[in-house]
Image (spheres, rainbow, N blue to C red):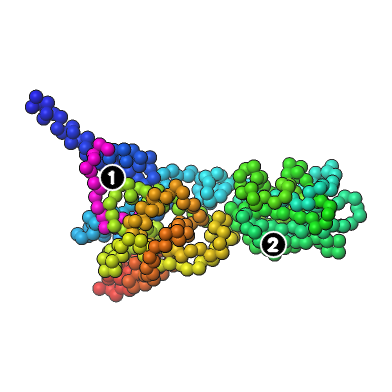
Amino acid sequence: MRNWLVLLCPCAVGVVLHLWLLLLSCPAGGPGQQHAAGLLAFIPHWKPKHYDVIVGVLSARHNAGLRNAIRNTWFRHLKQHPRLSQRVLVKFIIGARGCDVPVEDREDPYSCRLLNITNPVLNQEIEAFTLPEDDTSVLSEDRVVSVHFKILYPIIITSLGVFYDAKGVGFQRNITVKLYQAEQEEALFSARFSPPSCGVQVNRLWYKPVEQFILPESFEGTIVWESQDLQGLVSRNLHKVMVNDGGGVFRITTAGEGSLPHEFTQGVEGIAGGFIYTIQDVVDTYRNVPAKLLNFYRWTIEAASFNVLLKTDDDCYIDLEAVFNRIKLKNLGRPNTWWGNFRLNWAVDRTGKWQELEYPSPAYPAFACGSGYVISKDIVEWLASNSERLKIYQGEDVSMGIWMAAIGPKRYQDNLWLCEKTCESGMLSSPQYSPEELTELWKIKELCGDPCNCEER
């Protein structure tokens, strides 16, 4: 009997150790997350190790160079620090699945579809729609017609147009053409056609120039033709016109595809004219990380014990020791606390790199810039418990501000969380560095105690 006990004891110890390692190794939002929660039932008295600070570093899967730079700079310093090494836990926040399509080749920032553009003609005017030669113009009863589209590569619309009546009696109607951005009530620009001011005839349409600005990649819009007379419009079914998409730089969408909410569909879906555009040689950028952040919050609550959480990005210099000391000095671990450098009354961009199509207000609630901020555990718990319901907006920083507006945390403003790439003595963080720049900053910090000023020793 004793021999059997001798043999079984190492096995039992091995099973417990294996379960413990599984609990510690489950990544944020990963498939092991639910499995880890179930494993706790086998160890009812197990408690996760407690940390004063958990640091979450947002990182893209392809940013291995930046992650290695962090491992070799402030993260290495942390692990070697006799006081902090056991009190701070650092985790990289990386998506569970990657995308084989390079960012610059994707159809839009929120998908992994290949952008299939073939030989675009740059800086030349293109008519968006062409009528077949045998087409006969017919005046319909519809007084409002609209078409929805999505931009896959930046363009500039130079003119809006309407179909002409083939009866040859001249332009005898009053029509307004407007272009709207998705879910916006005010038109970006418009053109009005009337008998004394009918514009310029090109092929089988009348065109008028409009204010020009770039419609960026992922822009979703609607063109609405509205008759100001009692009679309807000369219009066509979407399938009865030839779409000149410039090699794939835009795509016509329909309400059936779910591209736009039903309440924003105006009039009958179809074409009552067209537009002229040019293709711009512009490259946009990619951001989509709020969901990763919420997954990380859930993981921290389920797998760790802590007082506060620090969020930063993989391109940021962080002085973690200074952050830790400031938390203790200012007692910033109190409940309902948010410590960072806050942007106030930040205007919502409707076009360009940071365009916001979902948030309806003209300005965002206060939000901390992304180089770093600290939140108390109770805030992390609230975010984790509501993560399935919280709406995701165009970026994680503004999303965080909108979410926090619901609970009104105590904000502690600190300009030492730098929002732009610059170096200041005593800074807690600074963003937008390359791996080489991060390494150099840390070398100077170790040599002189200040990454910004160093006299040769």
Helix, strand or loop for disc 1: helix
Coordinates of residue 410 in the picture (x, y in percent): 38, 65
- In the image, is residue 51 part of the stretch drawn in magenta? yes
Say above or below: 427 vs 44: below
The crowd level at tag 1 (other Cα within 10 Å; few <14, some 14-19, many 20+) is few
Label 2 sits on a secondary structure element that is: strand
Q: Nearer the viewer, residue 398 or 421?
A: 398
Q: Amino acid at mark 2?
A: Phe
Quarter of the image that includes the N terminus: top left
Name the residue furthest left.
2
Q: Residue at x 38, y 59 (%)?
A: 312
- Give the Cα separation between the discs numbered 2 and 1: 55 Å
Residue toward you, 273 or 34: 34
In-image side of 65 versus 326 (left or right): right
- 52 sits to left or right of 387: left
Seen as rendered, the residue at the extreme bottom is: 455
Q: Residue at the far right: name it.
A: 169
Quadrant where the C terminus is found in the figure: bottom left
Query: Do labels 2 and 1 touch, CB within 8 Å?
Result: no
Is residue 74 left or right of 401 when viewed as pictured? left
| Residue 34 in sight here | yes
Q: Amino acid at mark 1?
A: Leu
Q: Which residues are magenta?
A: 41-56
| Residue 189 badge | 2
Q: Can residue 242 be seen in this snapshot?
A: no
Q: Position of residue 66 (x, y in %)?
A: 38, 56
* Residue 99 locus on image (x, y percent): 48, 44
Residue under pointer 1? 24
* Residue appearing at x 36%, y 52% in the figure: 381
Q: Which badge, 2 or 1, comes first in the chain's sequence?
A: 1
Q: Quadrant of residue 57?
A: bottom left
